[in-house]
């Protein structure tokens, strides 16, 4: 049995908000690295059209 926790968030991005999402990603990635030392994997995926976000954290 693994002692790690992982989760996947899949959500739609509101039309016209993909630039806001990119800015949020720029802020959250360093904050996660600084404040969550146990985070092993932290990945963001945005669909080609910018309409869907997948976030994976372990």
Image: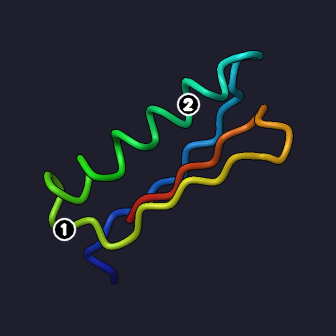
In the image, taking residue 28 as reference, residue 3 lies left or right, namely left
Q: In the rendered image of this protein, does residue 16 appear above or below residue 30? A: above
Foreground pick, 21 / 38: 21
On the rendered image, what quadrant is the C terminus found in?
Answer: bottom left
| Residue at which label 2 appears | 21
Q: Quadrant of residue 11?
A: top right
- Mark 2 vs mark 1: which is more N-terminal? 2
Residue that lies at the very extreme toward the bottom in this rendered image:
1
Residue in view at x 28 percent, y 52 percent: 30
Residue 37 at x, y percent in the picture: 15, 65
Q: Quadrant of residue 20?
A: top right
Residue in view at x 69 percent, y 26 percent: 13
On the rendered image, what quadrant is the N terminus found in?
Answer: bottom left
Residue 38 at x, y percent in the picture: 19, 68
Q: In the rendered image of this protein, does residue 17 appear above or below residue 23? A: above
Foreground pick, 25 / 52: 25
Residue 51 at x, y percent in the picture: 78, 32
Residue 55 at x, y percent in the picture: 54, 50
Task: Kindly check if marks 2 and 1 are in contact, taking CB atoms under 8 A apart as contact.
Answer: no
| Residue at which label 1 appears | 38
Using a 10 Å C-alpha cutoff, classify the residue at mark 2 as few (fewer than 14 neighbours), some (14 to 19) or many (20 or more): some
């Amino acid at each position: 049995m693994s002692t790690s926790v992982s989760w996947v968030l899949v959500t739609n991005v509101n039309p016209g908000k993909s630039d806001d999402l990119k800015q949020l990603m720029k802020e959250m990635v360093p904050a996660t690295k600084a404040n969550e030392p146990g985070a092993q994997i932290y990945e963001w995926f945005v669909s080609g059209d910018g309409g869907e976000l997948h976030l994976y954290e372990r």
